[in-house]
Amino acid sequence: MSQDNLTKLECTVCHRINYHTFKNKKKLKNRLEMKKFCTWCGKHQVHKETK
Protein backbone atom coordinates (compact mmCIF):
# COMPACT_ATOMS: atom_id res chain seq x y z
CA MET A 1 0.00 0.00 0.00
CA SER A 2 1.27 3.42 -0.91
CA GLN A 3 0.88 6.62 1.08
CA ASP A 4 -1.16 8.37 -1.63
CA ASN A 5 -4.17 6.13 -0.83
CA LEU A 6 -4.04 7.06 2.87
CA THR A 7 -6.85 9.41 3.99
CA LYS A 8 -7.60 11.18 7.28
CA LEU A 9 -11.03 11.10 8.94
CA GLU A 10 -12.05 14.19 10.94
CA CYS A 11 -14.91 14.46 13.44
CA THR A 12 -17.62 16.85 12.23
CA VAL A 13 -18.40 18.05 15.77
CA CYS A 14 -15.01 18.71 17.42
CA HIS A 15 -12.94 18.80 14.16
CA ARG A 16 -10.17 16.52 15.44
CA ILE A 17 -8.48 13.90 13.26
CA ASN A 18 -9.13 10.54 14.93
CA TYR A 19 -8.70 7.91 12.20
CA HIS A 20 -6.54 7.11 9.17
CA THR A 21 -7.77 4.72 6.49
CA PHE A 22 -7.06 3.58 2.93
CA LYS A 23 -9.34 4.49 0.04
CA ASN A 24 -9.51 3.22 -3.54
CA LYS A 25 -9.43 6.51 -5.46
CA LYS A 26 -10.34 4.82 -8.76
CA LYS A 27 -13.70 3.57 -7.45
CA LEU A 28 -14.63 6.26 -4.90
CA LYS A 29 -14.64 9.74 -6.45
CA ASN A 30 -16.41 11.69 -3.68
CA ARG A 31 -15.28 12.14 -0.09
CA LEU A 32 -15.61 9.31 2.40
CA GLU A 33 -18.10 9.70 5.26
CA MET A 34 -18.41 7.21 8.13
CA LYS A 35 -19.98 7.08 11.56
CA LYS A 36 -17.13 6.30 13.99
CA PHE A 37 -16.48 6.65 17.73
CA CYS A 38 -14.84 9.96 18.70
CA THR A 39 -12.70 9.68 21.83
CA TRP A 40 -12.86 13.45 22.45
CA CYS A 41 -16.67 13.71 22.23
CA GLY A 42 -17.20 10.35 23.93
CA LYS A 43 -19.81 9.07 21.47
CA HIS A 44 -20.36 8.02 17.86
CA GLN A 45 -20.17 10.95 15.45
CA VAL A 46 -19.99 11.36 11.68
CA HIS A 47 -16.38 11.51 10.45
CA LYS A 48 -15.57 13.01 7.03
CA GLU A 49 -12.48 12.69 4.88
CA THR A 50 -10.06 15.63 4.94
CA LYS A 51 -7.18 16.57 2.66
Image (cartoon, rainbow, N blue to C red):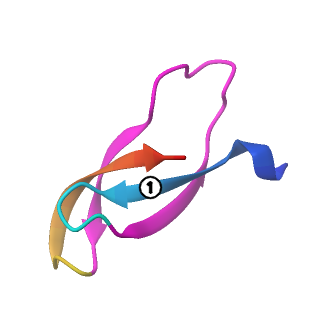
Magenta-colored stretch includes residue 21: yes
Q: Position of residue 5 (x, y in %)?
A: 72, 43
The residue singled out by tag 1 in the image is 9
Compared across the picture, whether 4 is left or right of 51 comes to: right
**Residue ID at (42%, 67%):** 17
Residue 26, by quadrant, is top right
**Residue ID at (44%, 45%):** 49
Seen from the viewer's position, the closer of residues 1 and 50 is 50
Using the image, determine if residue 5 lies above or below residue 27.
Answer: below
Seen from the viewer's position, the closer of residues 1 and 9 is 9
Q: Amino acid at mark 1?
A: Leu
Using the image, determine if residue 40 lies above or below residue 46.
Answer: below
**Residue ID at (17%, 76%):** 41
Q: Position of residue 46 (x, y in %)?
A: 23, 50
For the magenta stretch, what is the residue range?
Answer: 16-39
Residue 11, by quadrant, is bottom left
Q: Position of residue 40 (x, y in %)?
A: 24, 81
Using the image, determine if residue 9 lies above or below residue 15.
Answer: above
Residue 31, by quadrant, is top left
